[in-house]
Image (cartoon, coloured by chain):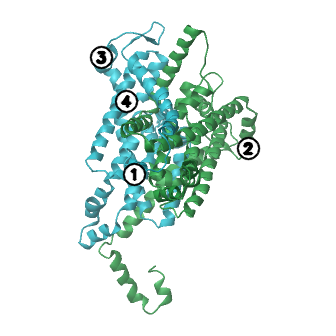
Chain colours: A green, B cyan
């Protein structure tokens, strides 16, 4: 602001400008040094965050057969990837895991958030504890204990009834749903807590049925959280490696499992091409979220940073 | 807390959803917690008192041998300590990078803030696995690793496969989780307090130490917990960037369950790991309850 002043009143400017600056930060001549350092630090931090992502995408277009040195632009790895039967199967599996996981987790998580509003206090406490435990317990512990449960359970089932079950897409979906239900539950509940209760009261006062109140008052207000929950659980499920790798069976490898296997043998341009495709899908999800929720929050005069990003930042 | 509006309404005698509807709403999620969280954890606890079957796996027994092995054999306990040290280092690294970054974002104009936060959410949203393995390319001997090698005149110099690579991966992977809560506290900070401190003649460093830091403390503790806990159980980063040589708890667990197939011992380790988490979280909750951390930025 103060920079604009000299342009309008050129005569008074030389005298006025220093006074203004002294009033702001005159006692602190180091202010600009700190500011410059902050800027430099932030730029480096963002570069640090984005470098690996950029590298993967750039090297997916690398002509060289060795993934690590750049020789020229090429699209051929994407061609190879689309011809690769293994990648195609992995892509199919990834979607057949992520879509049901997202739908079921969002439904169950939202239902639970609504139900928990009116359960007895003690029940709610136990439920909350389980929700947090499902998030706090390391993924690797959940993965291995779920593996042990399925393995022992299926063995027991076969020895007693002769029915032979195998791990595969259903077991992956079941395991993914556990932590995604918790995330949806927390997101929706945060929204419920911040909701304007008087609207529900008004709706009841106008003799609307509970179902109608839910459909026309509660649910529209919850929708942003539900959408965010759906996109979040889709992405978490789509990207998950640890749990997936332990509860998957023959023929149910997903894209992250494919990538991990490739990485263990040495990164190839094909790995980068598959990774780039994955990045594209998940960032499309984020973009959808940002767009729809950004609009929703503008409509309701939402606060803070708004959109999906703000929701996630504040949730954490 | 949230029960108040609901109970107030039922007191008002309005027709609300019945108890049956409530249980139907809560049932599926409850069932999932029961079948896929409680059951597996109970099984692991039971297994931890068993013995290894001849061909690997679990054979029923009741013995404390696995826990005794875990405590008395130093090489078995080592991954625990490595994990805790690495997680501590990673948390400190996240703080060093994250605190100035959060302060920078919080002091920008409103519109800029939104963009900068979005720019933090994007990497957070991106596959952890992909972001991790990319460091294989960056730190590899064809790129940064080799460059530093020639620079210091040591052709055998490697970054990958060292604890440093794992530490870097940890800081990189969890940085956004540290910045979010820090940002939330700093953003709500009353800027006039800083002005007042300066007006009273406090030096910049004193202002930071006596005004900004105490205000940021809740976010700082929450952020540290948010990154420290998953870092202890991290599996992918040490497996990829440490070549499995920096042996953390996650790697030791997978080794026990899948390589040596000693399920009871692996289960004992898992129980130990869960106990470490619970202790950490309890300390945190104790802090929250003492009022050191305001409710609105706590994870719990």
**What secondary structure is found at the residue carrying circle 3?**
helix
- Is residue B146 in sight in this rendering? no
Q: Name the residue beneath numbered marker 4.
A: B274
Task: Read off the chain for label 1.
Answer: B
**What secondary structure is found at the residue carrying circle 2?**
loop
Spatial CA span between label 4 and label 3: 17 Å
Spatial CA span between label 3 and label 2: 57 Å
Spatial CA span between label 3 and label 1: 54 Å
Coordinates of residue A248 in the picture (x, y in percent): 59, 25
Q: Which mark is residue A75?
A: 2
How dense is the environment of label 1, judged by Cα within 10 Å: few (below 14), some, or many (20 and up)? few
Which part of the image, by quadrant, shows the C terminus of chain B? top left
Q: Name the residue beneath numbered marker 1.
A: B8
Q: Earlier in the sequence, mark 4 or mark 3?
A: 3
Q: Which label sits in the foreground, 2 or 4? A: 4
Task: Read off the chain for label 3.
Answer: B
Q: Residue at x 72, y 40 (%)?
A: A78
Q: Is residue B113 above or below residue A263?
A: below
Q: Residue at x 52, y 17 (%)?
A: A153
How dense is the environment of label 2, judged by Cα within 10 Å: few (below 14), some, or many (20 and up)? few
Residue B201: name its quadrant: bottom left
Q: Which mark is residue B68?
A: 3
Task: Read off the chain for label 4.
Answer: B
Q: Earlier in the sequence, mark 1 or mark 4?
A: 1
Dots 3 and 2 on the same chain:
no
Spatial CA span between label 2 and label 4: 47 Å
Q: Which label sits in the foreground, 1 or 4? A: 1
Q: Is residue A176 above or below residue A202?
A: above
Q: Nearer the viewer, residue B288 or A89?
A: B288
Q: Is residue B253 above or below residue B117?
A: above
């Amino acid at each position: 602001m103060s920079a604009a002043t000299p342009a309008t009143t050129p005569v008074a400017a030389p005298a006025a400008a220093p006074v203004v600056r002294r009033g702001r930060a005159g006692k602190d001549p180091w202010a600009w040094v700190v500011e410059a350092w902050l800027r430099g630090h932030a730029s480096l931090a963002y570069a640090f965050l984005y470098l690996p992502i950029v590298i993967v995408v750039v090297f997916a277009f690398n002509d060289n057969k060795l993934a690590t040195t750049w020789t020229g632009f090429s699209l051929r790895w994407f061609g190879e990837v689309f011809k690769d039967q293994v990648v195609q199967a992995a892509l199919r599996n990834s979607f057949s895991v992520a879509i049901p996981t997202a739908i079921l987790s969002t439904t169950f998580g939202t239902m639970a958030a609504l139900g928990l509003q009116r359960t007895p206090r003690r029940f709610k406490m136990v439920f909350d504890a389980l929700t947090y435990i499902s998030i706090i317990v390391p993924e690797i512990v959940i993965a291995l204990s779920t593996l042990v449960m399925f393995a022992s359970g299926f063995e027991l089932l076969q020895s007693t009834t002769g029915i032979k079950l195998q791990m595969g897409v259903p077991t992956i979906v079941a395991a993914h749903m556990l932590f995604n239900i918790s995330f949806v539950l927390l997101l929706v509940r945060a929204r419920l807590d911040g909701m304007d209760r008087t609207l529900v009261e008004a709706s009841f006062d106008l003799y609307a049925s509970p179902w109608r109140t839910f459909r026309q008052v509660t649910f529209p207000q919850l929708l942003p959280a539900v959408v965010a929950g759906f996109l979040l659980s889709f992405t978490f499920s789509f990207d998950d490696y640890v749990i997936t790798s332990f509860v998957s069976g023959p023929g149910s490898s997903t894209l992250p499992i494919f990538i991990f296997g490739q990485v263990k043998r040495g990164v190839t341009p094909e790995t980068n091409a598959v990774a780039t495709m994955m990045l594209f899908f998940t960032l499309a999800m984020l973009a959808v979220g940002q767009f729809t929720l950004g609009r929703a929050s503008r409509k309701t005069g939402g606060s803070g940073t708004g959109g999906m990003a703000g929701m996630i930042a504040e949730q954490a | 807390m949230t029960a108040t509006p609901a109970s107030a309404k039922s007191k008002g005698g309005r027709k609300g959803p019945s108890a049956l509807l409530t249980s139907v709403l809560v049932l599926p999620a409850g069932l999932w917690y029961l079948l896929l969280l409680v059951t597996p954890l109970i099984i692991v606890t039971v297994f931890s008192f068993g013995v290894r079957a001849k061909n690997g796996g679990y054979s029923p027994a009741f013995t404390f041998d696995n826990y005794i092995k875990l405590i008395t054999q130093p090489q078995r306990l080592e991954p625990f300590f490595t994990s805790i040290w690495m997680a501590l280092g990673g948390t400190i690294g996240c703080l060093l990078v994250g605190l100035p970054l959060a302060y920078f974002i919080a002091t920008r104009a409103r519109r800029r803030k939104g963009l900068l936060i979005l720019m933090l959410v994007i990497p957070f949203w991106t596959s952890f696995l992909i972001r991790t393995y990319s460091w294989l390319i960056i730190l590899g001997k064809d790129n940064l690793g080799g460059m530093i090698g020639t620079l210091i005149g040591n052709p055998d110099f490697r970054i990958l496969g060292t604890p440093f690579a794992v530490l870097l991966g940890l800081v990189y992977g969890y940085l956004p989780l540290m910045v979010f809560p820090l940002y939330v506290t700093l953003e709500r900070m009353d800027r006039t307090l800083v002005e007042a401190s300066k007006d009273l003649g406090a030096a910049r460093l004193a202002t930071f130490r006596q005004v900004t830091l105490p205000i940021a403390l809740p976010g700082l503790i929450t952020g540290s917990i948010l990154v420290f806990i998953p870092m202890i159980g991290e599996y992918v980063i040490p497996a990829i960037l440490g070549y499995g040589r920096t042996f953390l708890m996650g790697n030791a667990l997978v080794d026990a369950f899948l390589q040596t197939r000693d399920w009871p011992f692996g289960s004992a380790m898992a129980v130990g790991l869960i106990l470490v988490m619970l202790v950490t979280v309890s300390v945190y909750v104790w802090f929250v309850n003492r009022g050191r951390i305001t409710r609105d930025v706590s994870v719990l």
